Amino acid sequence: MSHRPAVLFVDNGLHPELFNQFAAAIHRVRLRTIALSPLPFRRGVPGLIFDRVIDTSALGMVGIADQLRHEFVADVHVDEYVAAETYSALGQLPPGSRSDLWTGRQQLVDKRRASDVIRHAGLRAPEVLGVADATPARAVAELGLPIMVKAGVGRGGDGVRMAGTRLELEQLVSSLDDPQGWFFERFVDGEAFACGALATPRGVDPLVVYRATRRVSPFGPNSEIEVHEDRALEDAARPVIEALGVQGIVNVDIVRDADGVCWFHDVNTRAFGSLMALECVGFPFVSNYARWLAGKEPEGRRRAVSLSGRRIQVVHFPVERDWRTGHRVTSVRAVVQRWRRYLSVMGFRYTLRHTLRTLSEWRPRRGRRSSPPGHGSGEPALSDGEPARNRTRRPPMDVRSG
């Protein structure tokens, strides 16, 4: 058995770069990193940021326990679409081969269940109704308009809709293939934020509240965020994270309404998209994460100066995607502005691996590139809070959705 604790990174093949930045960073602090993916290209240069790569295209998640029998699995970051199978497979590992630090995360993969957990703790989450349990007429009567319709399991804006009228809602519901997996959610008008944190038995530290100021696409990852050091928001978010009853990296969406009331929804219990941008300006997620896995006390924030209002460019890879969406300049600028910090956190190996992968997949583009959202396409880029999955069309400028 390997003497180094291993952290698993599991994807479903659609977004293989989802965890690579965080994997590269913890690899540099001597944590063992293992990727599980159905994509064969990950085997090309695995040693650059992964100690091991397991191809799940043939064995699926069923054979994970046998593949990992000589490892000690300390933690796991998993794509929501394969989370249920992954957690089930990890439960088949012998007790001496797993830490079980992910206990409780599986129930939070389902957004409706996560919302119930928050409400049962006496905290505020938008009211919900199951699509299979309520007609559109009842949903409008009880939750009002506009109204959100969400898939129970989703990521990065997948499976989120918003209806402004009852007719729109009826049409939307009639188009769903499986109403059992969807729910209605009350729309909350207000300022949207996100809270990223590391939850451990010793407390929640670091805890960062931020908002998106620019995105790669209306429903895609942030390309720029703004730190929002607001004690009231932090004090409101902390008991929510504690009430979830899980350990590890957590991200929760917040909407603060006109009365100053905070509403919480859409919980993620994995490395989130803006995590490494926050790390690179002084929020010690990586070091505290490693200390947590080692059973040590967190070290606290590295910088004493306030970062409130600080806008941070977020590096997104692969560059091929940034090129298609017109945000290559943003990513390049982010690297240039903080290249020393990015290299010190993620290392040269990450940059090399990314470059090799991008070159292997590069295809020359022909014809005129269409304008990205917010750049003359008639589709505005979002500039409010995190995450984009709160809506499918942009409300008026002074409206945020929950």
Image: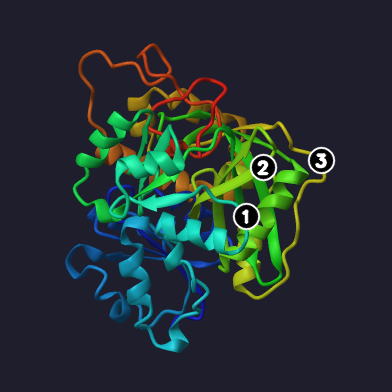
Task: Examine the image and state in which quarter residue 147 appears.
Answer: top left
Q: Which residue is mark 3?
A: 305
Q: Is residue 149 above or below residue 244?
A: above
Q: Please say if the residues under marks 2 and 1 sit with CB atoms less than 8 Å apart.
A: no
Please tell me whether mark 1 sits on a helix, a strand or a loop: strand
Residue toward you, 164 or 192: 164
**Crowd band around label 1 with a 10 angstrom C-alpha radius: few (<14), some (14–19), many (20+):** many
Mark 2 or mark 1, which has the lower sequence index? 1
Percent coordinates x, y for residue 68 in the rendering: 35, 78
Circles 3 and 2: CB atoms closer than 8 Å: no
- Mark 3 or 1: in front is 1
Residue bearing mark 1: 197
Label 3, label 1: how far apart the Cα atoms are:
19 Å
Image x and y of residue 278, in percent: 62, 44
- The amino acid type of the residue labelled 2 equals Val
- Label 3 sits on a secondary structure element that is loop
Marker disc for residue 80: none
Which quarter of the rendering shows the N terminus? bottom left
Q: Which of marks 1 and 3 precedes in the sequence?
A: 1
